[in-house]
Amino acid sequence: MKKHIVIPMLLAVAALASLASCKKFLEEEQVSNLTQNYYNNESGLNSLINGLYVYARVKHEWDANGARLIEPESDAYQSTNLDYARATATAYGGELSLIAGNVNNYLGAANSSFAPMGAYPHINNCNIALDVLDNTAPGKFGSDATFRNQRRAEVLFLRSWAYYLISNQLGDVPLLLTPRREDIGVYNYPKAKLEDIYKQILSDTRWAYDNLPATQSDRGRATKWAAGHFLAKLYLNRAQAAPFQNSAEQHLKMLYKGTVATDLDSSIFFATEVINAMGGASGLAPDYWTLFDPKSETNPHKEILWSAQFDINTSLNGRFNNRSVNYHIGDYTNQTGVIRSMAYGRPFGTFKPTDWGYDVFRDKVNDSRYYKTFQYEYVSNAASLTSSTSFTWSAAAASWWNANKPATEATVKSGDKRILPGQRALIYLENQRDEALDSALVMSQPYQFIVRWIRSAATGRYYYRKFIDQTDMGLANSRQAPYLSSKKYVDPLRGGSADEANFNSESGTRDAILMRLAETFLIRAEAYGRKGQYALAVADINVLRQRAAYKTGESRPAVLVQWEPKASTLPAGERIAPYTASNSYNAIAVTEASFTPGSPQALAEGYIPSATTMEQQFIHFIYNEKEREFLSEGLLWEDLHNAGLLYDRVVNLNQTASPLTGRWPVAANTAAGNGQDGNGKGQYQKHYTFRPWPNAYLVQLTDEKGQLLSAEARKAYQNPGY
């Protein structure tokens, strides 16, 4: 069993108006008669610091809390809920919208049964820990300066992480640096400028970097290299926003974090320190799937610089466990002969890729990350043909199959179940309109073949996302599944057991990756590129491309070779089972041509219309690459937001959220304007790149004397546009 941090119950003291309850934090390590005095002894202070790590889970513990805010709605990922996905007024319109409720939880909403869990209860607990460390320093904290400084560094790192996450959502937020140990009824929390917040968290994280050890005996504790990675990202974020200081666009101006000429150099410095410490390219997992394979859970690769800790002993995981294991999987059971299984995951269907989320993988044949990211094939696990939920052969489909089937396959007849137990049940193909497959071929296979574009064998018309019963899927239609799902979170020990009877447990047990070395390489690459040092940037990108390539002797998936349109470009020997590859790096190696306007390589990247210069195309290339590398890992919304790219990429690439017209190809099944008519289906606006302050928080704010704020003062506190 892995050695993890024991996270005790903590006293969560209100730090904001909506957090005005004093309750025990987690039912993990019981501490009886817990009071503030408990933290003034060595054992209590150590428990308090250990307990701060519960906040590392916030991105992955609950869709209504963290996951909903850090995953969708971006250019590449969206909610299946259409109000969220279309960015309607119901979801995004103001302080009472659905997203405002998510923000209230993220801040740390009070709960009748549990202590508040969000950013500010955590920040207040950090402040309590720092106060005791600096003014009491009981036991070993007083006698061992190295130990004290190491633990202090952890607290500063964790407090900075919280300010980073909450300011990503809201921009200017209260900057609280002293502890509050009791509720006195005064909730006067003026907002600090983002520039000042970054000064604080950069200073604190620098201190953490200088005092954290390179390794920790407990998995999940912050290390020097996690802090170095974080510093590289913070300096890059500040440099990204420096040009927005006087922007006429309010949503960009709000990103401004200060102007320091050396920020890009600092980002490069700290990224280089981390990369060198990890062994350079050898610090990456040699195979991309290794990072997400459940088999690696007991011995994660050193590429993972920091992760949120969960355990198969679910009593150690707090209130929610790792809920992200449930949110990325579409329904694979509808008439497929596939029964829900631990191997495939629980199909909640909460989040899914946009079309661009699939299309950003520009070379699905040679870049292994595409097929290692998605669950492209399901096999029937029905106990028998009689019990199978498989759909049946129609007369037309049976006739086509019998006339066109491989000689080794059996003939079929109308009315029989199509999908045999133990055989392929469901596959996906994300093709383009000009790659449309013949409809009779698609609809006449002995499995469900879910294809984005088909062309009618009878009329020549093009159809977008048809289910086997001819109903429309995707965009603004009510049927949002099945869809090609990310498999990065599949957890065969959900609920703490591999027993299939435990299937309905929502309690994920896998650690959740928060920082990994591949991101460090792309942070440095972006910083190099922003300085015009493109050759250095390309070298860093190609480190990831080396890993992304199929290696000599590795087998490509059968689905890829059989159905990907560009599989025909493979050498003949690689198109014969078992589809053994030669190294595909040369096919996906990056050069400056990839972001040189007008080059074939740049045109192939699918840049948005406003990216016309080399500088602009380079930045968009970086974010295309981030999406290929980190899709569904909870980084992309924040990264696009901080780079000032979120709005432009959403409205140009996410058709469900976009209000633009004429940007997409047209199909015959327009579904009364809800289907593929070439137009966006959404209402996304620029100010949505920042979240609204929730009404539940605003109505409890007071002035310094404890008087509730007026409606006018609350309006002034609210973010623009809401």
Image (tube, helix red, strand yellow):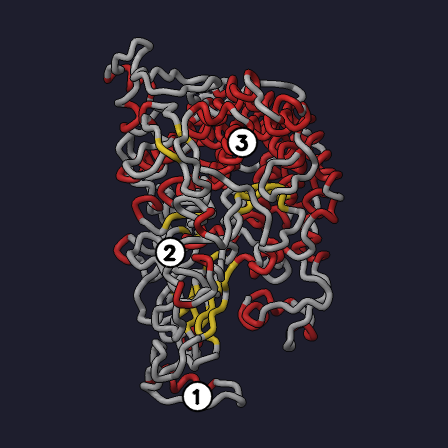
Residue 628 as seen in the image, left or right of residue 283? left
Q: Nearer the viewer, mark 1 or mark 3?
A: 3
Residue 317: percent from left, percent from top: 46, 46
According to the image, label 2 marks what residue?
Answer: 349
Residue 473 as seen in the image, left or right of residue 157? left
Q: Amino acid at mark 1?
A: Asn
Q: How far apart are the alpha carbons under marks 2 and 1? A: 35 Å
| As drawn, 508 above or below 219 | below
Residue 293: percent from left, percent from top: 58, 58
Question: Is residue 652 at least partly visible in the picture?
Answer: no
Q: Which mark is residue 402?
A: 1
Q: Callout 1: 10 Å neighbours few (<14), some, many (20+)?
A: some
Tell me where residue 27 sits by quadrant: top left
According to the image, label 3 marks what residue?
Answer: 43
Q: Amino acid at mark 2?
A: Gly
Residue at the image position 50 percent from the left and 88 percent from the top: 409
Residue 447: percent from left, percent from top: 43, 76
